[in-house]
Amino acid sequence: MKVSDEPDLCPIARALACVGDSWTLLILRDAFQGATRFDQFQRGLGIASNMLTRRLERMVDNGLLEKQRYQTRPPRFEYRLTDKGRGLAPVLLTLYAWGEHHLPIDARGIELVHRDSGEPIVPVIYDRHRGTPLVPRDVAMVAGPDATPAMRQRAERARAQGEALFTSPTQDTATGETAVADPLAEAAVTPSAEITGQRPQ
């Protein structure tokens, strides 16, 4: 899969080249929920054996999982998360929050709670330097010294559009007036219990 014309220069493209597809993220989800063996992943995902084999091998090659023998005859292996794989936990938590907010359903299959207190958790992204919750409108991607012309063009386009990229117009039903609302503003609200991935110490 070609994700970009400059995959080595763009961290997002490099990450996508490593993670690959939705199956990889679902394997990671199950690994974070304790799955380690081939049959556990297969039962949890309902994925074909050959597809699962290919993805597990690629995840091992990419350093997201490590293969450990747990039986000699016949040889059988477990797949354990590496530090690199565990580093994707904030990505999965953010996807969880996005899915809950934008794709809600009435049924409650799984919920995030604090391991010790049992309180609900709202994942938030923090800026380590400022120590404050971060929302997309606070972020600007600027061209680095080695950026290609295409990357510089995208950075300039993003700079010119600025905050408009992360706001959408909403209409007040009482007055009929249109206002600009930030659909991600609630991400800046600090909950009583949270997992942030990069929360400052």
Image (cartoon, rainbow, N blue to C red):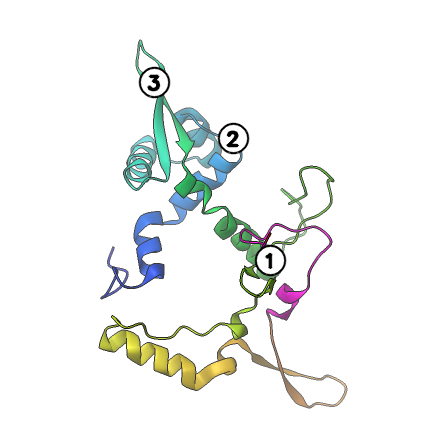
Q: Is residue 20 one of those drawn in magenta?
A: no
Residue, disc 3: 76
Q: Amino acid at mark 1?
A: Val
**Which residue is depicted at the point 33% across and 75% down?**
143
Badge 3 marks a residue whose secondary structure is: strand
Residue 153 percent coordinates (x, y): 30, 80
**Which residue is depicted at the point 42% across and 39% down?**
83
Residue 125, compared with residue 108, is above or below; it is below
Residue, disc 1: 124
Residue 184 percent coordinates (x, y): 59, 69
Location of residue 81 (image quadrant): top left
Q: Is residue 33 left or right of residue 193?
A: left
Looking at the rendered structure, which numbered label has been put on residue 34? 2
CA distance for labels 2 and 3: 17 Å
Residue 44 percent coordinates (x, y): 48, 33
Magenta span: helix, strand or loop, mainly?
loop
